[in-house]
Each structure stands twice: as C-alpha cells, then as structure tokens.
Image: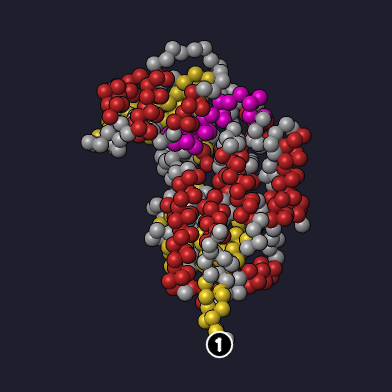
Amino acid sequence: MKTCINFLRRSFSGVTSSIPKISIVGAGPAGFYTAQYLLKKLCRCEIDIFEKLPVPFGLVRFGVAPDHPEVKNVENSFTKVAEHSSIRFLGNVSLGRDISLEELRNAYHIVILAYGAEENRNLNIPGENLKNVLSARRIVGWYNGVPSDRDIPINLNGEKVAIFGQGNVAIDVARILLTPVDELKKTDITEHSLDVLSKSNVKTIYLIGRRGPLQAAFTIKELREILKLKYCQTEWNFQDFNGLQDVVNNLPRPRKRLTELMLKSAFEISRNSETKFKPLFLRTPIKFIGDSSVRAVELGITKLEGEDILHQKAVLTGSQEILDCHMGVVSIGYKSKPPDSDIAFDDALGVVKNKFGKIDKGLYATGWLATGAVGVLLNTMNNSFFLAESVLKDIEKDSIANESRPGYRYVEKILNKRNVQIVTWKDWMNINSYEIQEGLKRGKPREKVVDIAKMLKMVA
C-alpha cells in the first residue's frame, strides 16, 4: 500500500489539506528524477517542469552517444512521470528570457533549478580560436541533434585528430569519428552529421591527458567499446606504463580492472587496420599551431608528483614536442551558467552557490548545476532523490506550503502576455511520432528534428 505525505494548512474554517506548488527548471535527468521522487512521496501536488527547448530529456536526448540506445531507455520512465496527472510540461520556455526567477518564486512554493551544464571549459591557450579547434560538447551536440550545434564548422578532411581530455565524453567523440558509417546508420545519429562522417578522411585519433594511466577518467565500459571497434587498432605508448605492473595488484578493484585492461591491450600484437586510436599520457597542450586552421599542437611533457599514486599532480618538465593534427577537440569538462541575474553563481566552479542543493528558502538546485559536471546517470539520480527528500523535509519543517501561491495560472498570464509559444507534452508526443516515422523511412530508431522553428510550426 502506497504511503504519501499530506501537508496541512490552517484556515478560518479549520485545518485543510495544502497542495504544494512546485516548479522545476530543466526537463533533463535531474529534473525528471526529482519530480519522480516527489510524486512518490506527496499525496497531492502540482509540479510544472519548464524546459527552454521544445523537446524534453536533456542530456539523455542530446548527450548520450547514438550507439548507446540502452542508456536512452530511461526516457520510458521519464515519460510515465510526465504523463502523471500532477505534472505539467512547459517546453520552449526559457528562464531569464521568457520568465524570471523572481516571477517563478512568486508563483510557486518551491523552485528547483535543474537546467544542467551546457557550456564547455576552455584550455585558454594560444591558437584555441583557430578553425577546426572545437569543443567536444559542440561535436556531441552536432551528432545528437542540438539545434544550436547543427551547423558547427567541422572539417574532417584531415587524417589526424587530437582530443584533449580522457573522460567518457572524449572517448565517445573518438568512437563516433572512428566507427564505420554503415554502423552509425542504424542509430539515431543526425543525417547532417552522418553525411559529413561518410566523407571523413580521419585515420588517427590521439586521446591526450596531462596525467598517467592511473588517473584516466574514462570507464572500463567505454574503453572496452573502443578496443573492440571494427577496423581500428588501439596503440599505446609503452613508456606510459612503466612501473604499473608492480602496483596494479594493490589498486582498488575498479581501477585495477581498468588498468589491467589497458596493460593487456598495450602488449597485444597489433593488427592491420584502417584507423588508429592512440591514447597519450603525460602530455599537456601549450599552444595550437596554424595560420587560419590548426595544423599542429605543441605539447608540454609532464611528470607526476605526489605520494598518492591515484591522485598525483602533473608538473611540466620543460620538454616539448610537436604533434601534427588537422583538428583539435577540447574535452575537459562542462560548466553551467546563470541565465538570470538573481541566481547566485560560482563562476570559478561553474555551479550555482548552494549547500547540499539548497540555495534559499524555497529555492534549490540539483544535478550538474549544483554538483558540477561529474558522474553518470546513476549519480544524477541519487543526487536528485537526495535533493527531493530535503525539499520534502523543508516543506514540512518550514510550513512553506502554508503560504498562498497562484502556481501556473500566474505564469501562464505572463507567458501569454509575452507571446511565448508553450509546447505541451501532447505537442512533444506529436514531434516524437514524427521523428520516429522519419527514422523508420531511413531504417533508424528516429530522425531528430533539429530546427526549433520547424518544431514550433509543427505544433502551432
């Protein structure tokens, strides 16, 4: 039997049940997981989920690699949340542009910011503005259908690509660039990127990190996938593994398994292949070299210092080397930005200022906006559940829901006055059906609409 929480409000006629009015800004994993938890615990509530794009699911739709369809299955559970009678999806509504934080706080008892991290961190080195030096975030958006990334000036005519960063996103980009196009055609990758990839001349991709194999941020699953990639040979620098055999048995289990896989791969007999994947450790970019477009990068050689072998720091040795490359990809992390001046923000960390998700009375943050861009979907889920539990306790403790709030009817008047076209869940389902039908014509799960104007016209 389901147990749920009723919040009580005192009135002149006695004690009545109060309905908490909650707004969540961001329809990605953090937003949906938070709503899911609140729905399980509250007997009655009104939850409005605002999303700046006309389509939901955030990082699941736009961040998960197209050849990882199993990860996207979480959309099914998010859909069940969205179809709950207490939930209202409001797409094409942007915080700071269409509605202010102050207006949301006037309308709702609780405002939860969950809009994620959509900016990339830069290397801040000379030459970073050369043509064909791109962020991994934008490349991911390009092949995943982010409207603002569909026309990035990506050039795959050259043979060598240097990716800076050794996390899962970096490996995702490398894998998509190296995967045979016939394999990608079966996924929901965008047609515009598929067309460019079909003409690619890329033969070698370097995955460059300033520290060593024991500090690599990619997971064993991601490494296994690229090691098994068709027609591609992984080549390691043997010197990067000096001394690892002596310490591998003393490592924590996850790191031990990952290190053992790297060691095994490093000493396997190489095979003939069309493309090569070359992880390079103990290198840091000093500057990109080129006249208009990048043609090489100067790397500083580093060494590791510190007692803790898993958390040693990289220090420049003073030695450099030049690496030829026809494209540079920066993959050193994402960061958030404040869309509204009323949001207290830590620019250095790229997160909203918060204490375990709480910003102020009735105002919270969750997901990467609160924690920084770390972890996988499971981490986001746990973080969102924790935040939702804190919200419930604060509602009860601070009697937040006792105060009168107009909720959506107040926001609706503002949006109508500003001529904002609201995309409902029913509208999204129409877009969804169209994408699936277009995908079937091409033998794909879906063909994403990447033009916002087209989306809005479809549901006008």
Q: From the top left corner, tell me how far across and down residue 43 is, in percent.
A: 57, 66
- Compare residues 381 and 440 and report the one nearer the observer: 381
Q: From the top left corner, tell me how far across and down residue 132 is, in percent.
A: 54, 34
* Element assignment for label 1: loop
Q: Residue at x 72, y 54 (%)?
A: 427
- Compare residues 392 and 285 and report the one nearer the observer: 392
Vertical arrangement, residue 271 with respect to residue 406, above or below: above
Amino acid at the residue labelled 1: Phe
Q: From the top left corner, tell me how far across and down residue 255 is, in percent.
A: 36, 32
Please say whether residue 174 is one of the residues in the magenta stretch.
yes
Q: Which residues are magenta?
A: 162-185
Residue designated by label 1: 12
Q: How is the image coloured?
A: secondary structure
Evaluate whether residue 188 shows in this view.
Answer: yes
Q: From the top left corner, tell me how far across and down residue 377 is, in percent.
A: 50, 45
Magenta segment main secondary structure: helix
Q: Residue at x 32, y 34 (%)?
A: 252
Q: Residue at x 48, y 31 (%)?
A: 222
- Judge left or right: residue 393 versus residue 403: left
- Compare residues 207 and 168 and report the one nearer the observer: 168
Q: Residue at x 74, y 32 (%)?
A: 442
Please say whether residue 178 is one of the residues in the magenta stretch.
yes
Answer with the quarter of the image where residue 63 lies. Answer: top right
Q: Which quadrant is home to the C terminus?
A: bottom right
